[in-house]
Amino acid sequence: MVTTGSIQLLPELSGLLQVPSQPTLARSPRHLLPGATVEAIAPVRFSLVVPTYNEGRNIERIVALLSDQLEAVLPHRYEIIVVDDDSPDGTWQIATQLTSRYPNLRVMRRQAERGLSTAVIRGWQAAQGEILGVIDGDLQHPPEVLQELLAAIERGVALAVASRNVEGGGVSTWSAMRRFLSRGAQLLGLVLLPDVVSRVTDPMSGYFLVRRSAIAEQVLHPLGYKILLEVLGRGRIEQIAEVGYVFQEREAGESKVTWKQYRDYIRHLVRLRVSLGRLGRFQQRLNFPLGRFLRFGFVGLSGLVVDMGLLYLLHGILGFGLTRSAIVAAELAIINNFVWNDRWTFGDLAQQQQKRHQVIKRFAKFNLICLMGLILKILILNLLFNGLHLNAYLANFLAIAAVTLWNFWINLKLSWRVTQVK
Ligand code: GDD
Ligand code: MN
C-alpha cells in the first residue's frame, strides 16, 4: 500500500501483463489490526475490477450497488478494485474517499499506463481472490447479474460471461448503426478466429468472471477494449457459462468508444490469430521471440543503409577522412536503429518506461552493446577467416549473423528489460 497523506492507494504496477498464480500483496494492514474480527481476516474469495475513466458521477453509486450485492453472498470475502487512469474528473480521489465507508474497496491510480484492457489486468495482478471479475463503472452492466455469475463459477466453470445474446439478454435502445457495428465486429471475429470467438455468444462483453487458475502465469497482450478475447484466446478455459443481461443506457458521463477502438479490435484479432496459429505455436515451443527478432533484423538492415549512405556522402562526396566519416556514419546508424527499435521492435516494452531518464539510459546501453558487438564481430570474423580459413565474405556474413543474435538478446535483456516494480 502506498500512502498519500492519509489516503491509501494500491501501488501502480508495471512489467509484463501476467496474473500470478498466488496473490502477491498482503491484505490491507487494517485487517490485521488488533480487534479485527474473524470475518475481516477471512481470505478474499472474489476480486472485482472496475476500470474507470471520468466516472466521477457514477462511482459512488456503482460501489454502493456492488457492495450490496457482494455482502449478501460473500460477506467480507470480496474486494472491489477501482483502477482509474488518473481521470481529470478525479474519479480515483472520489473512490479513495469512499474506502472509509466501504472497507472492501481498493483503488489504483495509474499515471504511467493507459487503456481499458491493461487497467483490468493490472487490477487482477493486485487482486487477492481466486475468482477474478470485471464490470464497467458506468452502471451499464447491471450489478444484479453478479450473483448469478458467481454461482456459475462456484458450480465449477472456468469462465462466466454476462451476455446480451442469450435468454434474458439484450440492448436497451441502441441505434441501428451501433447494432450493425457490434454484429459486424462479431462476424469479423468469427471469420478470423472461429475457435475463440464462437465459444461465447457475446465475445464483446466486458462483464465476466474468470478463475485465477485459468489465466495465471499467461502473459497477456491485450489491445483496445476487448479483454475477453484475450482471456478466451490465451486462458486455459474449459467450461463456460453465460448469463443474460440487458445493456443499460448510460445516465451520467460519456462513453469512451471512438473509431480507434474498432481499429484496435481488428489489430487485436489479427495478433491473436498469429500467436494462436501454427507459427505462433511453433514459436511458443521454440521459446524464442521470433517476431521481435525479425523486427530487430529489419531495423538492423535499415541501419546498414544509413551507415553506407552516410559513408558515401561524407567520404565519397564531401571528402572527409575515412575514419572520421565511418565513425559519424556508424553513430548515426546507431541512433537510427535505436529510434526504430524503441518505437517498433520493443515498442510495447518501451511504452511502459517513457520517462526521460529511462529513455536516455536505454540509449546509452544500446550504444555500449553496439560497441561491444562491433568488437565481437571483428573477433569472430578473424577466427573464421584466419583460424578456419573460410571465405572472407562467408566469414563476414556468419559474423554479422552471430553478432545480430547476440545484440538482440543482450538488448532484450538489458536495454528494454522491464523490471517488475512493486
Ligand atoms: N481505467 C480505464 N482506462 N478505464 C476505462 C478506459 C481507460 O482507458 N476507457 C474506458 N474505461 C472504463 C469506463 O470508464 C467504463 O467504466 C468502462 O471502461 C467501459 O467504457 P465505456 O466507454 O463506457 O464503454 P462502452 O459502454 O461503450 O463499451 C462497452 O462495450 C461493451 C458492449 O459492447 C465495453 O466497455 C464493454 O465492457 C461492454 O460490454
Ligand atoms: Mn459504457
Image (tube, helix red, strand yellow):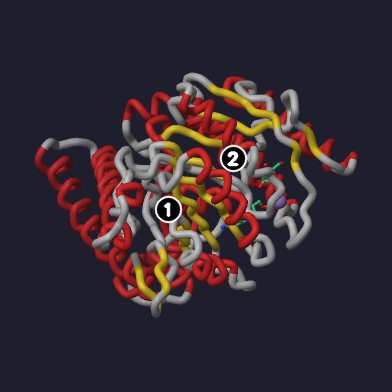
Residue 304: horizontal and vertical position, in percent?
Answer: 42, 55
- 76 or 341: nearer the eye? 76
Residue on which disc 2 sits:
268
> SS of the residue at dot 1?
loop
**Closer to the camera: disc 1 or disc 2?**
2
Mark 1 residue crowding within 10 angstroms, few (<14) / some (14–19) / many (20+): many
Mark 2 residue crowding within 10 angstroms, few (<14) / some (14–19) / many (20+): many
Q: Identify the image quadrant of residue 394.
A: top left
Q: Amino acid at mark 1?
A: Phe
> SS of the residue at dot 2?
helix
Residue on which disc 1 sits:
346
Residue 381: horizontal and vertical position, in percent?
Answer: 19, 46
- 17 or 165: nearer the eye? 165
Which residue is drawn at the image coordinates 59% and 46% (left, top)? 135
Q: Is residue 119 left or right of residue 250?
A: left
Which residue is drawn at the image coordinates 32% and 32% (left, top)? 287
Q: Identify the image quadrant of residue 322.
A: bottom left
Direction left: furthest residue: 387
Q: CA distance from mark 1 to mark 2?
A: 17 Å
Quadrant where the N terminus is found in the figure:
bottom left
- 335 or 288: nearer the eye? 288
Q: Is residue 417 visible?
A: no
In this view, 284 is above or below 325: above
